[in-house]
């Protein structure tokens, strides 16, 4: 545990030192978010590429943890590098969605090649906790999972500090899940990631001096998707479906509601809008900081429920998941998350 705490401190310091340097680089490269449409909440040009600082700290942290380094970790770092390269290009030139998708697919395939993929799914019909081996079906399922979570974090990155804070809470949740299920490697990775986020967050919290950009939001989503495969989905003691869906719940459900909302209103699924949860809360008259803190609380509650789900039987955990999802859908309906923009 001492080694984990030390890694968190080191990565936080590295990220904190790197962020101002990355900010200067972003300005030099003209990677700046200039508010140009109604979806933008900020009112002044702000440098992007903050995710590079998180990436640097994470890579150094993983390398320092060489005693636990595995071939899967190498695949994780290579995949993360692909995501960051695509993110930097997007922050500078604004890539079209289909090109972003190419980078995400390549990164997901790299994970699979290096042995990090979904292989088992809990059998919900068997209360004894048996598992179904997915075989080759695990390949497309892994790709869908990685792409889905990567884009989910990208979509919630709409308010200062939101994606970073939710990413930190998700990291802590997966850290606890990994410790409980005995996945030491995943525990170290989530600890390193949480440290990297802590160092960046003070610069990103409202009023932000730098945004993480697509570089950061996609990196967080990719890393959490990959680590959840290693920490929760691969664990024979974890409820394979419920735990990740709860631990990463906020970005997952906000993205699903956005897709449904756009489909119902006849808009392209990938077209941005102002119907996300943070937009609705801002519409209620809350400040950016209040909105972010509320969404942190929601994420933490979902994370806590994920940890509880690990301590009960599969049947009870699935019932808990169904109850939580039903409640979330009800609240989303009341807040108008399925409606068009207001």
Image (cartoon, helix red, strand yellow):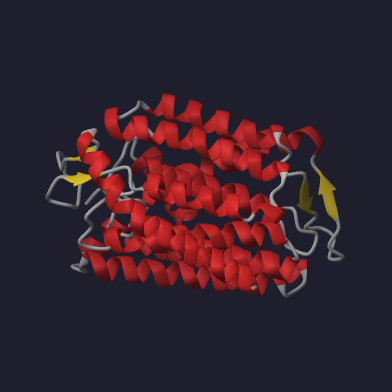
Q: How far across and how far down the image is residue 167, in percent?
A: 46, 58
| Residue at 39% from the left image edge and 36% from the top image edge | 87
Residue 305 visible at all: yes
| Residue at 27% from the left image edge and 64% from the top image edge | 281
Which of the 4 quarters of the picture holds residue 246?
bottom right
Q: Is residue 284 above or below residue 101?
A: below
Residue 117 visible at all: no
Nearer-the-camera pick, 230 or 309: 230
Say left or right for 2 vs 67.
left
Furthest toward the left, the residue is: 44
Say left or right for 31 vs 195.
left
Q: How far across and how far down the image is residue 294, in percent?
A: 35, 71
Say left or right for 72 vs 124.
left
Q: Is residue 173 above or below residue 214?
A: below
Which of the 4 quarters of the picture holds residue 22?
top left
Q: How far across and how far down the image is residue 109, in percent?
A: 63, 31
Nearer-the-camera pick, 8 or 99: 8
Q: In the rendered image, which quarter contains the N terminus?
A: bottom right
Q: Give the total of numbered labels.
A: 0
Nearer-the-camera pick, 106 or 8: 8
| Residue at 71% from the left image edge and 36% from the top image edge | 114
């Amino acid at each position: 545990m001492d080694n984990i705490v030390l890694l968190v401190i080191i990565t936080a310091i590295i990220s904190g030192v790197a962020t101002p340097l990355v900010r200067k680089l972003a300005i030099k490269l003209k990677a700046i978010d200039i508010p140009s449409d109604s979806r933008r909440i900020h009112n002044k040009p702000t440098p992007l590429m903050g995710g590079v600082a998180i990436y640097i700290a994470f890579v150094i942290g993983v390398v320092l943890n060489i005693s636990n380094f595995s071939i899967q970790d190498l695949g994780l770092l290579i995949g993360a590098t692909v995501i960051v390269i695509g993110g930097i290009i997007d922050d500078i030139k604004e890539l079209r969605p289909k090109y972003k998708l190419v980078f995400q697919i390549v990164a997901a395939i790299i994970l699979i090649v290096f042995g990090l993929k979904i292989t088992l799914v809990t059998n919900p019909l068997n209360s004894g906790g048996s598992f179904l081996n997915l075989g080759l079906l695990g390949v497309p399922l892994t790709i869908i999972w990685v792409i889905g979570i990567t884009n989910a974090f990208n979509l919630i990155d709409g308010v200062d500090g939101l994606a970073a804070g939710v990413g930190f809470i998700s990291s802590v949740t997966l850290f606890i899940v990994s410790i409980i299920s005995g996945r030491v490697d995943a525990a170290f990775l989530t600890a390193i990631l949480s440290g990297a986020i802590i160092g960046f967050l003070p610069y990103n919290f409202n009023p932000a001096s730098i945004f993480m950009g697509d570089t950061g939001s996609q990196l967080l989503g990719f890393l959490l998707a990959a680590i959840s495969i290693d920490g929760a989905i691969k664990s024979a003691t974890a409820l394979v479906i419920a735990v990740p869906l709860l631990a990463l719940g906020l970005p997952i459900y906000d993205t699903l509601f956005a897709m449904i909302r756009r489909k119902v209103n006849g808009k392209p699924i990938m077209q941005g809008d102002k119907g996300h949860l943070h937009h609705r809360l801002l519409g209620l008259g809350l400040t950016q900081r209040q909105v972010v803190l509320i969404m942190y609380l929601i994420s933490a509650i979902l994370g806590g429920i994920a940890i509880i789900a690990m301590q009960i039987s599969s049947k009870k955990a699935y019932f808990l998941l169904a109850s939580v999802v039903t409640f979330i859908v009800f609240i989303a309906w009341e807040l108008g998350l399925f409606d068009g923009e207001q």
